Image: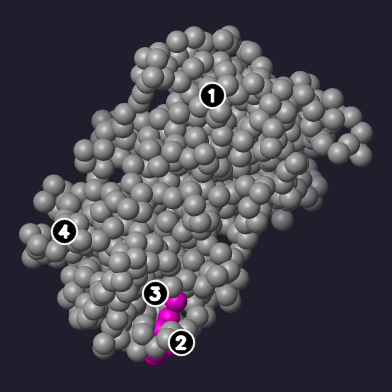
Amino acid sequence: MVTITVGYIAGFIAAAIFVTRIWAPLVMTFILSGVLKDRNSAATWSVAARSLERTHWPDILRSDSVKTHGARKTVVLLTALITAMTMLIAVAGIVTPLGIYQTLALSENVQTPFKYLLDTSPFGVGTPPRSNFSFNRICATGDLLTSMPIPCPFSDTIAITSTDGNWINASYPYGYDISIPKTTLDIYSSGAGNDTTISNYFDIQWRQYMITSDPKKILNNGSLYLVEAFRGMQSLGLNNAIEPVEGLIVDTVNGGIGFRNHTVPPGFQLGVTWEEDLLFIEPETVCVDTNTTLDYTIAVGINATIPIIDLVLTDRGGFVNINKTFPVANLTNPQENQDLWTRAYKAAWMTNAYTMVWYNVTNPHNSATGQSAFAYRDTFLGKEFPIVESSTQGLYTSFGMDATFNQHLNIESDGPGNSSNPAAGGLPNPFKISNTNFTDIGMLCAGAGDGDYANITNIYVHCALMRGIPQRKDDGSGIVFEPGSRWSQPLYTCASSVKATVKTVSFLFNGTHELSNLKVSKVQPKNYSDPSSLPLWGVENTNNEYILGGLSMIWGLVSPKYENHPNVSTVRQESLYLTGYFSDIGNTGFTSVPGWENLPASDFYHLAMESAYTVNSNAGSALDYTGQNNMAVWARWQKLSNSTATAALIPNLIFTDYAAAAVVGTKGVLGPGNAAAQNLVPLTVTPTISVIRYHWAFAIPAFLVIAALIFFTAVAAIVMLCRRHNIGRLRMHLNQLAPGRIFTAFLSPEPGAMSLSAEAWNRAMGKLVIDVSDEHSLGAGKSDMPEKPTAVTGY
């Protein structure tokens, strides 16, 4: 569709004027000709001729003045050039304005005050006011919920332990102080002060919370304290956009959240742009194809007890081409190299190996007989292995993440499909494989469990088997389960970690003071000039006195003065991979049960990832990410399930959805909580203004006119200098070509009529009547003079 610009309107007006300038003289001179008649004074003939010859009637009617036979060639050429020049000027007058257009452009940078921007969406409505309760933490000898609390790093809590030989008991004579020590607050707030928009660890808060207390009056001496209370919010996972919500920038294109308490510069009617550096938490996921699939047929009949039949596990190369060498991931420095691919590949390898042993496709290593593993392989490409259908109908028709790596096989406890009789499923299972054999896979993939030391090298990695959305294999709609249709469900193993990084975000604010008018135009990694300018990240160094299951580790950007601090482990790099551990027991992510502490920046990311990795038809997720009851989710996941590269985005998006509902950023341009009256961060913004621009291609006719005008002006100057031509001679030619003067010169008896000045001629002969009717025809050249001398008369 063509956009009508100011230039087009000007061009249309110029064209209309051009047509009018041609049409009006034609009409008016037509009227003039009607009143002119054949008998007029000499002056009347000259005046009328001037008007008639200035119109296009001579060209239209092909009158004498356009006939060139007998005319001098130079005169013919120059008159043609005059006509062409006139037409070129007319074209330029129409075309030249077409290039004018009005557009929006960026003006010079300015500094201006920012103001808080309220979110009226469900995220804003569902975010309660920020609480004045401080951060708190509980540390333990093991699992935080089941083991004995111990003092946290730098805490002044005193714990007295005793044992009766069976149990270790602890007492706290002064209570258990759950507050964060000032030393810890200072260290992990030092790297991002109030003069920057980058959030520090303590700028991150729970979106929803509750206030509780310890009925035993041990924790916090029975005083009130704040804990997490997760509730689902508006789902953003399918938006495929980067958008602001209350306290966050949510990226559902790649996955991740950025922390920002939204403020904007008001008062710019046409919009304003600016950039800010923000702290982001992003998931990273790698998936590997097991090269096995679940294949089945949709049963005929809507009343079928089981909607699928002929369920089989098909060897697509995962069994027949299995590598006999056990994969080993590089875990020497996980902060530099997470090696997620090898971790995921190890999980795929172990899943296939255990499955092969269960089906007796191959054998495990036998230390008693010395028989090596994979001594035989009874399979081929495309071989199908039967599976007893699970009673969970949606297991094979929807999306799922399985941290146990065996749900798709329906092994249960003792055998295929029947816990009391391993052979009931028709499989011999000679090596007595059960679901417990698969439980090692997640831990070996992740590399760290709850009993490992709490340090910077034990990064958080979560692993699971992904059952992708099935793909239809016969003709027909790919989103309709038609009776008799064949479907194939891909099986991938995935490994995910979480990193903190700084990104540069470009904002555009336009319109009224509403969050919906704040747009994120671009998000890109922050550019660093040299290695020394990279951010310095710090993580608590516990000297291996704590384990991951008993300590939520504090991290963040730290000042260079803490780079060699004995209780701080630091790395100078673009991103920090956050610490944590894997467990497939009891860790189901966010639930309706309130949390135990207020340390959101340490707890939310593994809870969000655990929520993403427990999406299953068996687990009652707060939101339906399986697609079993949500067709939009099902169709989106089906498209992403086509390959391991795109399938890795699914847990990232689910993580992002949970994370956005869980936490909120409190820092903005006005500082923490946007509490300052004026900007604490010296930001410059670029207003958008309306400007007039021009497309120079439309100026080509005008340039030709200018060039021709310069050329003819130069020629006129040369003619005037070299041939002594001047305005007087031009005036003389104009007089000589006037019809009235020509008539009087030939018909009047008075000599010298051609040399009279215009004023003298007009006074002397202007009133002489010239009759050009057939009754008084005039002769010329050798023709006879008119018979009636009364052709020239006075009034």
- Regarding residue 12, the answer to whether it shows in the image is no
Label number found at residue 661:
none
Tag 3 residue = 598
- At horizontal 44% and vertical 36% (from top left) the residue drawn is 441
Gap between marks 3 and 1 measured at Cα? 47 Å
Q: Position of residue 444 (x, y in %)?
A: 38, 38
For discs 1 and 4, the disc positioned in front in the rendered view: 1
Q: Which residue is mark 1?
A: 431
**Which mark, residue 215?**
2
Position in image of residue 688 (x %, y %): 41, 63
Label 3 close to label 1 by CB (< 8 Å): no
Circles 2 and 4 in contact, beta carbons < 8 Å: no
- Describe residue 33's horizontal placement relative to residue 185 as left or right: right
Disc 4 marks a residue whose amino acid type is Asn
Q: How many marks?
A: 4
Question: Which of the 4 image quadrants contains residue 486?
Answer: top right
Q: Is residue 399 above or below residue 427?
A: below
Residue 134 position (above or below residue 760): below
Considering the numbered disc 2 on the image, is that residue within a helix, a strand or a loop? loop
Q: Earlier in the sequence, mark 2 or mark 3?
A: 2
Compute the Cα span from label 1 to label 2.
51 Å
Residue 490, how many percent across, how many down? 60, 29
N-term mark: 4 or 3: 4
Q: Nearer the viewer, mark 2 or mark 3?
A: 2
Q: Is residue 171 something one can see in this rendering?
A: yes
Instruction: First in sequence, mark 1 or 4: give its number.
Output: 1
Residue range in magenta is 222-227
Between tags 1 and 2, which lies in front?
1
